[in-house]
Image (tube, rainbow, N blue to C red):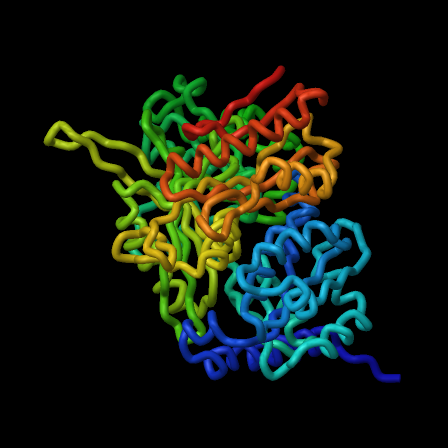
Amino acid sequence: MQTLDPSLIETQHIEVFRQLQSQLRDRWPTIELFDQSDADILVIPSLSVDQRELLKIPGCHHYEERLLFSLIRLQNPRTRLIYVTSQPIHPSVIDYYLQLLPGIPFSHARDRLLLLSTYDSSLKPLTQKILERPRLIQRIRQAIDLKNAYMICYNSSFLESELSARVGVPLYACDPQLSIWGTKSGSRQIFAESGVPYPDGSGSVWNVPDLAAEAVNLWERKPETKRLVVKLNEGISGEANALLDLRPLQHLAPGNATSEQRIESITEHFSTMSFQATSENWANFSTRIPELGAIVEEFIEGEVKRSPSVQGRITPSGEVEILSTHDQILGGPDGQIYLGCRFPADEAYRMRLQELGIKVGKKLAEKGALERFGVDFIAVQQPNHHGGHHWDLQAIEINLRKGGTTHPFMTLKLLTNGRYDPATGMFYSPHGRPKYYIATDNLQKERYRGLLPSDLMDIIAYHRLHFDTGTETGTVFHLMGCLSEFGKLGLTSIGDSPQQAEEIYNKVVKILDEETRHNSNNHTWELDACGPIIWNGTT
């Protein structure tokens, strides 16, 4: 019996994938038609990233729930949706989302939703689990209208392109061949080509000696640098970052020693870096460099510093559209871990973020990128000649995937049917009311452990914490499956002003604390209403 060359099979699926993806432009020539059309949507919320890096995030296997905002698309009475997960989702969580739909009978929406599971809790990406189950793929094919369907995902890898080819529906996401532009080194190249300001640093290195040499080169280019950031090329939420403090090495600063001495000393000091993931250390981090690659760049210092971001999408026809801007809320040892966000970003730099986002988006479109992209920045307040101040923006990373700001904004957009106005950087409901929110994936407290999704539903109902479709204010919860084991919950609190959004958020936290006051509370990550992250408990 003759066997096929695996490389030929892979080439074949790539060709089929690209043929399918080319149909997106023909089926939906404008983005308005795409957003409003009747379609069958296959949702694959797989986190198809390096699984060892993913494990740094508590409860990461529940992050498949973050795309559940897609269920709100069932408000279109002719949309059908298939949502696949590794493990079944608690029925009360599904009911919660379907009951958010304005004007749609619950039973009508439920009949148009097919939930499938691989019943596999292993540490493999969901898409890989699906590919290992041909009968499951066949069931998906039978349930979907192949001529009027598309597939969406969290991030696009070769696993997703193969699944797209095997199911026979186009993937509305970036071709995985272009994933380099979403890495740390690829981001820096896009910034350089698009004329967007970004910190000085290196390209990819693949071993420790080269990393030390690049760190020294950077130090010698900028002798005033106090700290350097070392980043693995692929990481999520800042968990793959480490901070190297040069201040203890000032006796070896440029002018005081040779380059060789600096390289030797920095190599020794890599083990003393401040790792942003609590479980990380140099022994493990150094083994990831040959596998993932790494970069080193200057750490942007500043007394008043923020981390804004801009989100956009590239349509099948190649147009670039800005979707939103946010001020990200960061925590961790050195303020590099993503914890949450506020919408919209500060008006002092909101429009500038949009301008830079368009530049990056156009360059990505030239490369052939499609759908979602986000750009993270560092904003430092600088004095000007008139006694006031301005904000200096430096781009630090591109995400060619859905991120922590995607589901809060899409939840707002789908629930209210409102619109984002690029002229103001604001979002308006159909009634013309500006909307604001504060969102997090990381409301995590020890005392919340043991709460079941049904317990949370009881608390939401009793205290009326739900989102009110009449006033278009309230809280939408997510990551509910994470609650019982990890005491971790996600939420988006929506208001008609920044103050109201924070008041709604704080009310939710206060009530959850009161409802669980009999539980232990030794360690807490919490979003403070004013912005910083508060760590309560012993260190």
Taking the view exactly as shown, the residue that stands out farthest to the right is 1
Rendered-image quadrant of the C terminus: top right
Q: Which picture quadrant has residue 510?
A: top right
> Quick one: 255 or 374, which is closer to the camera?
374
Q: Is residue 293 above or below residue 43?
A: above
For the image shown, how many numbered marks are present on the structure? 0
> Quick one: 28 or 218, which is closer to the camera?
28
Task: Say whether residue 496 is visible.
Answer: yes
Taking the view exactly as shown, the residue that stands out farthest to the left is 386
Q: Position of residue 39 (x, y in %)?
A: 57, 75
Taking the view exactly as shown, the residue that stands out farthest to the top is 538
Residue, x 82% and y 72% (percent of image)? Answer: 135
Q: Is residue 71 above or below residue 254?
A: below
Q: Position of residue 431 (x, y in %)?
A: 35, 57
Q: Position of residue 443 (x, y in %)?
A: 58, 34
Q: Is residue 50 above or below residue 414?
A: above
Q: Position of residue 131 (x, y in %)?
A: 75, 67
102 lies left or right of 421: right
135 lies left or right of 285: right
Residue, x 44% and y 53% (percent of image)? Answer: 374
Task: Say whether residue 185 is visible.
Answer: no
Rendered-image quadrant of the N terminus: bottom right
> Quick one: 285 or 402, which is closer to the camera?
402
Residue, x 56% and y 40% (percent of image)? Answer: 465
Q: Is residue 210 above or below residue 74?
A: above
Q: Which picture quadrant has residue 381?
A: top left
Residue, x 64% and y 28% (percent of image)? Answer: 445
